[in-house]
Amino acid sequence: MMSSTKELILPQMGCGTWAWGNRLLWGYDQSMDRQLQEVFDLCVSNGVTLFDTGDSYGTGKLNGQSEKLLGKFEQEYQGINKERICLATKLAAYPWRLTAKSMVKAGLASIERMGRVDLAQMHWSTANYFPWQEWQLLDGLADLYEQGLIKGVGLSNYGTKRLRQVHQKFSDRQIPIATLQVQYSLLSTYPVTELGLKDTCDELGIKLIAYSPLCLGILTGKYNDPSTYPKGLRGILFKRLVPEAKPLLDCLSAIAQSRHKTMAQVAINWCIAKGAMPIPGAKNIKQAQDNIATKDWLLDAGEIAELDRAAKIAQAMVQNIFQSK
């Protein structure tokens, strides 16, 4: 199914379905469908209209279930802002995808599952281990755009140097890069402070998207007690990160109390204040309401400076291994 040639519309804040995808990956529970549909409806009706997922979320026997659900929710929604919904997915650089045609095929499969794809993104760069493959896949992403199958192209986990190279490649075909999403939060400032991605994106006319703006939930404050840490490898990570983040969490808490907001809302609003579009995950109505209440106010300069100072002394979150430079 070919998507409309209507202009790509990007809102101020989006919803990241990666949280749905990870949940679905480990065991799909159909009882969640109704709840997730309610989350989707609530977000759209309140102006949160960008929904981001990936063709690698809900894979295997689930056969792209995250994309299927998102497409189903969009088709069934009939309320306000329906015309502003932007369905975004990320196409994985799997080792068996080696040609431009394989990327086009992947895009067509996502379109089949979702009904349409407005924004198709390269999920990660292979520059660190197989640059030849990446160039071919980027050609396929460009082909999807030129054939009118998608409204916009984006990238994920790219650094400044690689971004400029890809931007030139796309410019040669007169294709704009609409978005770049990176792991960005108060505990993951590296893409902006070290790589300078925000300045580069502004220069090139690219919208910066912040995924994991709550840093796996650490910035919500709900993991202050070690007994609440998740199990397994994530728990080991939390044992290192959370104690080191206490001054930052205390700062978040103080600002949240003075603003009559939640810590999560302050952390998300910080991303917005920095000029990035956060895509926090939402698996239930309460989380969605909390996220939505972030978008109509802004931290002041003093509060942002306090958070910046606290973030500098906190132990940084481990970067995505596919993040290029």
Image (cartoon, helix red, strand yellow):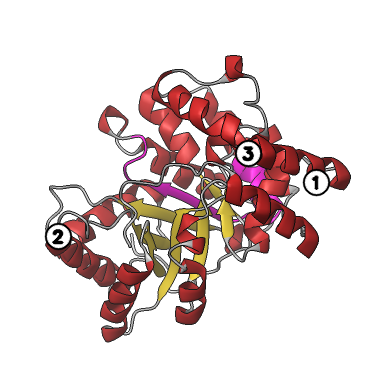
Total numbered badges shown on the rendered structure: 3
Which residue is at 40% across, 53% downward?
89
Q: Name the side, left or right, on which 132 lies relative to 268.
A: left
> For the magenta stretch, what is the residue range?
40-58
Q: Is residue 44 magenta?
A: yes
Observer-nearest residue: 29 or 153? 153
Q: Which residue is mark 3?
A: 219
Name the residue type under label 1: Ile
Observer-nearest residue: 25 or 46? 25
Alpha carbon distance from label 1 to label 2 = 46 Å
Q: Quadrant of residue 85?
A: bottom right
Alpha carbon distance from label 1 to label 3 = 13 Å
Observer-nearest residue: 213 or 140? 213
Say which element carries label 2: helix
Residue 225 placed where, x, y %? Answer: 64, 20
Residue 58 placed where, x, y %? Answer: 36, 34
Which residue is at 22% across, 56% downward?
126
Which residue is at 55% across, 21% downward?
229
Q: Which residue is mark 2?
A: 133
Q: Which residue is mark 1?
A: 255
Q: Name the side, left or right, on which 88 lies relative to 168.
A: right
Q: Is residue 103 above or below residue 172?
A: above
Residue 3 in sight here: yes
Q: Name the side, left or right, on which 171 lies relative to 268.
A: left
